Image (tube, rainbow, N blue to C red):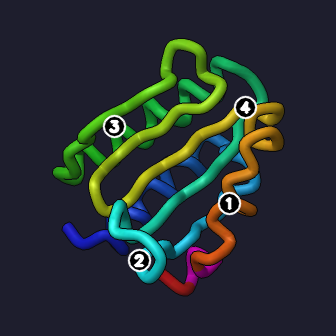
Amino acid sequence: MESREMALLAIQALEDKKGEDIKIIDISKVSVIADYFIIAGGNNRNQVQALADNVDETCGRAGAKLRQMEGYESAKWILMDYNDIIVHIFSKEDRLFYDLERIWSDGTFIQKEDL
């Protein structure tokens, strides 16, 4: 599965569980770690975990292999590494604190429709 398709699946899974302020950053020209970062927020611990569960289930059904997941227990910042895409799911406070959008501003912010 190509990274674009995988990104679309992950975004749909986040939208299905009401993920907030979903951002897509194409980092393929500025980093070798992945093609896309997908960043989303949740309102509380349960929602953040539900978002991660839905991404895992949706992408897994499509054959994507989750290489690594970190932060699930605390549910403040869950990182899901699918090689070509990396999904970051944040609590509101941690998203503001870590501000990945600023850190990765060398990447290209894109809309779902442009994937």
Q: Give amino acid for label 1.
A: Ile
Q: Based on the displayed image, in which of its 4 quarters is residue 22 positioned?
A: bottom right
Chain-order first, disc 1 or disc 2: 2
Q: CA distance from mark 3 to mark 1?
A: 29 Å
Closest to the camera, between mark 1 and mark 2, is 1
Q: Label 4 neighbourhood size at 10 Å, few (<14), some (14-19), many (20+)? A: many
Residue 28 marker: 2
Taking 112 as reference, is 69 above or below it?
A: above
> Total label count?
4
| Picture coordinates of residue 85, whole percent (x, y) | 38, 59
Spatial separation of the CA atoms under disc 3 and disc 2:
25 Å
Residue shown at the point (59%, 15%) measured from the top left: 74
Q: Secondary structure at mark 2?
A: loop
Q: Secondary structure at mark 3?
A: helix
Which disc, if any, is residue 57?
A: 3
Dot 1: element: helix
Residue 31 left/right relative to 103: left
Q: Which residue has dot 1 on it? A: 103
Point out residue 97 in the picture as x, y percentages from the top left corner: 80, 39
Residue highlighted by disc 4: 91
Q: Residue furthest top?
A: 73
As rendered, which of 96 and 4 lies closer to the eye? 96
> Closer to the camera: disc 4 or disc 3?
4
**Range covered by the magenta-colored residues:** 108-113
